[in-house]
Amino acid sequence: MTTGPFTGFAALHQRNFLLFLNARFFAHIAIQMQGVAVGWQVYALTGKTLDLGLIGLAQFIPFAALVLPAGQLADRYDRRRILALCFLVDFLASLALLVFTLSGLRDVWPVLGIMAVHGSSRAFTMPTGQAIVMNLVPAENFSNAVALSSSAFHVAVICGPTPGGLLYLAGPHTVYGTVAALLALSVILLVLIHTRSQGTISSEPASLSTLLEGLRFVRSRPVVLGAISLDLFAVLFGGATALLPAYANEVLHVDPIGLGLLRTAPGIGAALTALLLAFAPVSRRVGRSMFGGVALFGVSTIVFGLSESLPLSLAALFLLGAGDMVSVYIRHVLVQFETPDTIRGRVSAVNSVFIGASNELGEFESGITAAWLGLVPAIVVGGMATLLVTCLWMTLFPVLRTMDRFPRLASASTDRHSPARTPLSRKRRRRRR
């Protein structure tokens, strides 16, 4: 793994990786813009925070049902084509939102149905998008590639919400039309990629046993299990982004542009942190850095929930995004380096289940909690729960807490029934020295 600030970047400037980065960048901008429009449109129709939670639930249910089979497909077929088809489905979903809006939308159920289609597409996009990066860059450049890919994603998070809010002033149909155009561009860019072999393609016959191989692998690796489950429960309780439309309207009293700024602030913090990690990857005290990032996420959530000032709220969301980025970066590098390429899609699918549960199911949990406790208490309690989870996971997964360096890249020939490795223990580090 490269540790210098600029080492290995020349190898990343290859055509396929750049096409992939741009395709995901435009697709994520589109999804962020669509998220602003859908949230504001639904809240304008009903005025209920619970309906904001239902947006997340509508995406999570099909996502959870399809993501494990999607991981198996990513291990058996061309990952580039799978991503292109997913973005094509998202393009058609955005056109459906445009049609419903132009026809005079009066009910939220058509929107929830379309978001369920988006959740289905995301079930295939996430594990495939995670697994394909290793096929586009040399292994020694992978940590830099993760940081660059994460940076591009969060730049899209920055660029998406505010233009989405601005375009919404001209009507949600304007947003959905723009989203469709960006997704069409993403499909074209992916089609232009000519990938080399994606590694060791799984030759195992499709079965329930091979479908669950990713789950067995994660369960056998305490470090991986601890990392992805920490993210699940921390963000599940601490996710406040689903409530931003209500918070912007009821607490800060800002318009859709203000909502776009609030949606943008976490992305700015995350993008700047990702750029820093791209030039100076984490190489020591990996476990402590991960827990520190999650703790910062929880504290920032509490501050945001108590704030009644737009500048303070933006600052809290900025730090929230920075802390989340540290956790995301470490978890992604750790999972991909621990996993042989033959099951990388399936393990990425398990990782995606945890991420999806923390995001979409977290949005539903936030909506339910806000309807039960109230808007501000729901956010504050969520941040406190995140800190509690952080402390609990430090106790339950000491191997993760004491992890100093990332493990070496897993071999494609790793025996799937081998016992869990512990390359992070201090005793084994001494032996290697």
Image (cartoon, grey):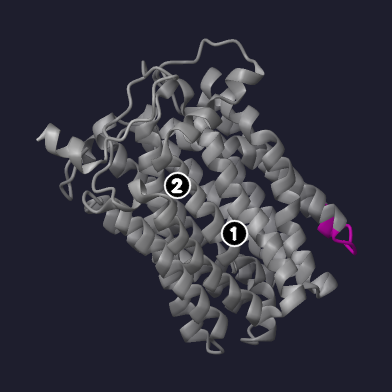
Q: Is residue 337 left or right of residue 425?
A: right
* Residue under pointer 1: 236
10 Å neighbourhood of mark 1: few (<14), some, or many (≥20)? many
The structure residue drawn at horizontal position 39% and vertical position 35%, both measured from the top left corner, is: 336
Identify the amino acid type marked 1. Answer: Leu
* Viewer-side label of 1, 2: 2
Image quadrant where one finds the N terminus: top left
Instruction: Please tell me whether residue 151 is drawn above or below residue 375 in the rendered image.
Output: above
Q: Give x and y (percent) for residue 81.
A: 56, 26
* Residue under pointer 2: 226
Q: Is residue 98 left or right of residue 76?
A: right
Q: Which quadrant holds residue 326?
A: bottom left
The answer for how far apart the CA atoms under marks 1 and 2 are is 15 Å
Identify the amino acid type marked 2. Answer: Gly
Q: Which quadrant holds residue 103?
A: bottom right
Q: Marks 1 and 2: CB-CB under 8 Å?
A: no
Q: Is residue 152 left or right of residue 348?
A: left
The structure residue drawn at horizontal position 54% and vertical position 54%, both measured from the top left corner, is: 29
What span is colored magenta in the figure?
A: 100-108
Q: Nearer the viewer, residue 127 or 109?
A: 127
The structure residue drawn at horizontal position 72% and vertical position 80%, both measured from the top left corner, is: 374
